[in-house]
Amino acid sequence: MASYRREVRALVHDLALARDGEVPARDLEFTAVDFETTSLAPPGRVIEVGAVRMRGDGTVLAEMSTLVDPGPGVAPGATWVHRITREHLDGAPTMAEVIGDLLSLCEGSVLVAHNLAFEERFLAHELELLGLTAPPLPGLCTLRAARTHLGAGSCQLGALVEAFGLPAVAIHAALDDARACGQLLLALLAPPHELRLASRPRHHRLPVVPSSGRSLPRAAALRAGRRGWMACLMDRLPARGLHPPQPEGVAAYRALLTSVLAQGRITGPKAKLLARQAGRAGMSRADLVRVHRAVLEEEIARAGGPAGPGGQDGPDGDRLRRLAATLGLPDLSDLSGPPDLPGLPEQAVAPPTELVAAPPSGGCSTADTPSERRLPTYQG
């Protein structure tokens, strides 16, 4: 264990948040990260990566989510915690295939995690296994900040999300936990706490590793809720992908969706099948919206228009509205615009324009602000 601790000290330069800090965070960039792993410390392996690149004003620049195959036959560890099985990992990209995307997201930003030492140890170990050497990264630990500035009470991520009333979920799924960590950071930077950095971060160029363009995002802990299975599935995927999805996988997803709809209502097991296929194809929420809109628009065309025979209040109009809701899409009148994301759902933790520290009251703009640095360029 001592050798891994030495790697951590070499990898991350800890920054502190203070009420009297001299460096406001609004214009800085942060990358909130979370790893699901096979054990509590190296030589265990990372089996899922979630990361959210954002500015201190809440602007989200990019998201990353993928399962990671640590090697043939390597057991996933505490499946009862992270719900990742060996079957999930079969066919997932390796760390060598995704480390380039992760380093690109972290380039020029402050690394943020809830219990940063945990993520640092595993990142250092994975870099070492790949023969990569990284300069010190500036880092912030939201767990340490919460213990320092929030006083008594549980500082577990889920408890803090609930205490702050954040629209995130913390469910031991990497992207969801990274989103929750990012929202917690913003809550600490906002009134009434208004924490600032005690010192300005120093950035060094990170290794440039070609990206494989592969990802296998996992939509964990699906719940129907009041908005339906497909809306929850969209919530659990990255808002937009770093890379185009696999065309064959997208076609397979659409065929499966058409088959499921033909069988009647979408149930939990069917939603999980769709989630697995969406992950295998490397699809984002924007990709799902496009496929779902295409399916709905075909039904609209068959019905003779959005209202169908009998007008907006006729039976076809009602049927199309129910189908739109089933597919997690907005009202039919919104389909006249370009095929982009609908208003972001309530549990979406990373609205592309602003990441708020309280539950949103409605839809958000879908505009992206591209990073000035070398972030992956595909935006779904």
Image: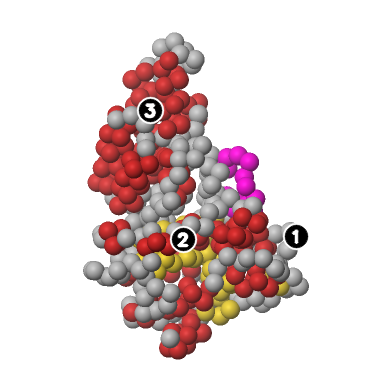
Q: Dots 3 and 1: beta carbons under 8 Å?
A: no
Q: Label 3 amino acid? A: Glu
Q: Which mark is residue 192?
A: 1
Res. 194 image quadrant: bottom right
**Is the residue marked by circle 3 packed among few (<14), some (14-19), or many (20+) residues within 10 Å?**
some
Q: Sequence order check: which comes first, mark 3 or mark 1?
A: 1
Mark pair 3, 2: CA separation: 36 Å
Looking at this rendering, what residue extends furthest in the front direction?
80
Q: Is residue 53 above or below residue 234?
A: below
Per the image, the residue denoted by label 2 is 172
Q: Label 2 amino acid? A: His
Mark 3 or 2, closer to the camera: 2
Q: Label 1 amino acid? A: Pro
Quadrant containing the N terminus is: bottom left
Residue 118 on image: x %, y %: 49, 74
Task: Note whether residue 224 is visible.
Answer: yes
Q: Sequence order check: which comes first, mark 2 or mark 1?
A: 2
**Is the residue marked by circle 1 packed among few (<14), some (14-19), or many (20+) residues within 10 Å?**
few
142 on left or right of 224 = right
Look at the image and say whether residue 25 sits in the magenta stretch: no
Residue at the spot 43% in from the left edge and 69% down from the top edge = 103
Q: At numbered mark 1, what does the secondary structure look like: helix, strand or loop?
A: loop
Magenta extent? 353-365
Q: Is residue 11 above or below residue 151?
A: below
Mark pair 3, 1: CA separation: 47 Å
Q: At numbered mark 2, what does the secondary structure look like: helix, strand or loop?
A: loop
370 on left or right of 193 = left
Q: Which mark is residue 297?
A: 3
Mark pair 2, 1: CA separation: 28 Å
